[in-house]
Image (cartoon, rainbow, N blue to C red):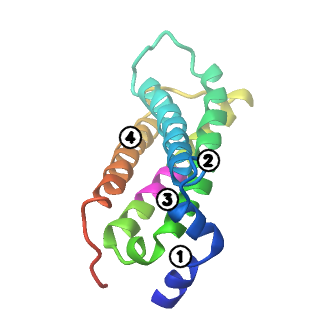
C-alpha cells in the first residue's frame, strides 16, 4: 500500500497542490475543505439541534431543505479532501488517526442519510416527532460523530505517522 500512496503523492495534481506557490493550490483547496465542512456540519447541527428540542416553534418539515446544504458541503469536502490527501498521501495514509477520522465521517454520512430519509417521509404523510427516541438518538449520534471527525482531523496535524 505504501507504494500506491507514494505514487499518488507524486502525481501531477498532488505535486501541484503541495508545491505550487499559487493561491489556487493548497490554500484554496484547504479553504474549500473548510467551507465544505462548515456547510456539512453546520447544516447537520441545525437539523440535529432542532430534533433535540431547540427552537421547538420552528416546524420540522421546512428544515428538509437544509439537507441540500448538507450534501453540497459533503461533496465539496470530499473533493477537496481527496486533493489534500493526495498532496501528503504517504504521511496521512500511514496514520491510524486518519482512518479513525474516515470511520467517523462514514458514520456521520450514514446518520445524515437516515435522517434525510426520515425527513423525506414528512412530505409523504409520515409524521416526524421531535421527541421520538430513535430520531433523538440519531441526532445525538450525528453531533458526536461530526465532533469526533473534526477532532480527529485536527489531531492529524500533531500526531506523527506510526506503522500499522
Dot 4 or dot 2: first in sequence order is 2
Q: Are marks 1 and 2 in contact (CB under 8 Å)?
A: no
Q: Nearer the viewer, mark 2 or mark 3?
A: 2
Real-space CA distance between mark 2 and mark 3, rounded to the nearest whole angstrom: 15 Å
- Residue 45 rendering spot, x and y as whole percentages: 45, 32
**Of 119 and 154, which appears nearest the observer?**
154
Q: Secondary structure at mark 3?
A: helix
Residue 128 seen in the current view? yes
Residue 117 seen in the current view? no
Q: Secondary structure at mark 4?
A: helix
Q: Are marks 4 and 2 in contact (CB under 8 Å)?
A: no
Placement of 119 over or under 100, stated as above or below: above
**Of 126 and 86, which appears nearest the observer?**
86
Q: Quadrant of the C terminus?
A: bottom left
Number of marks present in the image shown: 4
Q: Which residue position holds label 1?
A: 9
- Residue 89 rendering spot, x and y as whole percentages: 47, 73
Q: Are marks 1 and 3 in contact (CB under 8 Å)?
A: no
Real-space CA distance between mark 4 and mark 2, rounded to the nearest whole angstrom: 20 Å
What's the magenta region?
104-110
Q: Which residue position holds label 3?
A: 106
Dot 1 or dot 2: first in sequence order is 1
- Residue 135 rendering spot, x and y as whole percentages: 47, 37
Q: Secondary structure at mark 2?
A: helix
Is 161 placed left or right of 72 in the picture? left
Real-space CA distance between mark 1 and mark 4, rounded to the nearest whole angstrom: 33 Å
Is 121 placed left or right of 115 in the picture? right
Amino acid at each position: 500500500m505504501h507504494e500506491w500512496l507514494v505514487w499518488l503523492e507524486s502525481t501531477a495534481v498532488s505535486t501541484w497542490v503541495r508545491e505550487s506557490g499559487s493561491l489556487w493550490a493548497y490554500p484554496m483547496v484547504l479553504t474549500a475543505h473548510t467551507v465544505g465542512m462548515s456547510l456539512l456540519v453546520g447544516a447537520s447541527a441545525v437539523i440535529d439541534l432542532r430534533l433535540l428540542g431547540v427552537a421547538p416553534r420552528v416546524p420540522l418539515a421546512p428544515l428538509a431543505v437544509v439537507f441540500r446544504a448538507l450534501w453540497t458541503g459533503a461533496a465539496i469536502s470530499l473533493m477537496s479532501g481527496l486533493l489534500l490527501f493526495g498532496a501528503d498521501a504517504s504521511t496521512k495514509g500511514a496514520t491510524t488517526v486518519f482512518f479513525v477520522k474516515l470511520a467517523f465521517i462514514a458514520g456521520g454520512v450514514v446518520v445524515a442519510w437516515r435522517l434525510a430519509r426520515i425527513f423525506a417521509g414528512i412530505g409523504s404523510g409520515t409524521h416526524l416527532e421531535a421527541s421520538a427516541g430513535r430520531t433523538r438518538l440519531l441526532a445525538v449520534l450525528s453531533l458526536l460523530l461530526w465532533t469526533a471527525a473534526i477532532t480527529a482531523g485536527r489531531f492529524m496535524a500533531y500526531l506523527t505517522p506510526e506503522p500499522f
